[in-house]
Amino acid sequence: MRILYLSRVRLNPYVDLLARGVAAADPALRPRQIRTLSWPRVHLDRGWRILHLHWIELLYNYEPVPHPQAAQNLHRLLSTLERVRDQGRKLVYTVHNISQHEGQYPDLNQQANQWIFTHADAIHVHNRFTADQVARLYHRTEGVVIIPHGNYIGVYPQEVSRHDARARLAIPQDHFVYLFLGQMRPYKGLDELIGAFLTLDMADATLVLAGHIADTSYARELKQLAGDHPNIRLFPSYVPPDELQLYCHAADVCVLPYRDATTSGAALLAFSFGCPIIAPAIGPFPELLGDGTRGLLFHPQEHDLNEALARARALPLAEMGRAARAFAEARDWRTIGAQHARVYRELF
């Protein structure tokens, strides 16, 4: 049974890891990845039976494009998906985001969500929080399956030592290092993180911010906030896969000060490197942190991120790092692939 995975995302290896996990768990299933869905592919290629969609907001607004073009793209997408269903094929949708993070085109986001949550044969979410959101916002409870996000162990090199990582990044060996790693976007709260770090006035701590910034105005804002502070290191560019280990191994703790989140691959990435996290008590983070053995929650309504940054220095971080790594190891892709395979087979 062939399965098509439809996703426009290039840099995140999530879909590739899922496809490999499914193929390893159930060799009779043959996953294949595609970036676009044309009518000839739907009509002429008769060999596949399940279409598994990811990040629907990027399927009609990838560039991004002006609203009229995005609306036209969405209409074309939903028409093609209707034809998929008319042919007796099944639709599965993984909920990476409930809403587009920058709030662009909320009318189209609502329209796309309403259609997919109504018509998909199975809805995959990574946590109970998202399942509850889908039920509350779109009244979908049947056919919703919770399968966790997998790890990134073995995806990226992990050979460099902590000492060498800090030396290559020119970070003092005796500093306490807070890390943010990933695309820098306004919804991730980096302005608040910089502000909280500055209030602590810690001479022996370094804040590292590393990742691509697509919005030039946001890049200017972050640079202005950081100023010329000697203990704030801003690396505003794409981090190649083989360099991720430099940042993760140099860090004492990874900070994810998000204002909104549905799931968090960034948390699983940190855990895969044995790095505990500081995260807000929203969305998926309470479930990911569990009993607090893998990191520390802060409460954004109480604006206590600076307190959490200060408290982190007294935590048993080596022990928490081991717990984080063990948590990630338990989320291997073959086990996760087996759970997805069961969902696919139950559709027929």
Image (tube, grey):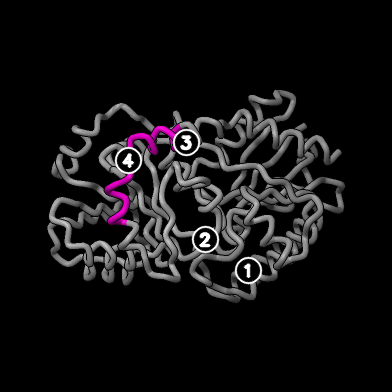
Spatial CA span between label 2 and label 4: 23 Å
Image coordinates of residue 28 in percent, x first then y, are 74, 25
Return the residue at label 2: 282
Residue at 41%, 51% in the rendered image: 296
Image coordinates of residue 100 in percent, x first then y, are 55, 65
Q: Amino acid at mark 1?
A: Asn
Of the image marks 1 and 2, the number of the one nearer the N terminus: 1
Q: Residues within 10 Å of mark 1 (few under 14, many from 20)?
A: some
In the image, residue 265 above or below residue 55: above
Pick the residue in front: 154 or 295: 295
Spatial CA span between label 1 and label 3: 29 Å
Decide: marks 4, 1 in contact (CB < 8 A)?
Answer: no
Of the image marks 2 and 4, the number of the one nearer the N terminus: 4
Of the image marks 3 and 2, the number of the one nearer the N terminus: 3
Return the residue at label 1: 109
Magenta span of residues: 309-325
Pick the residue in front: 206 or 90: 206
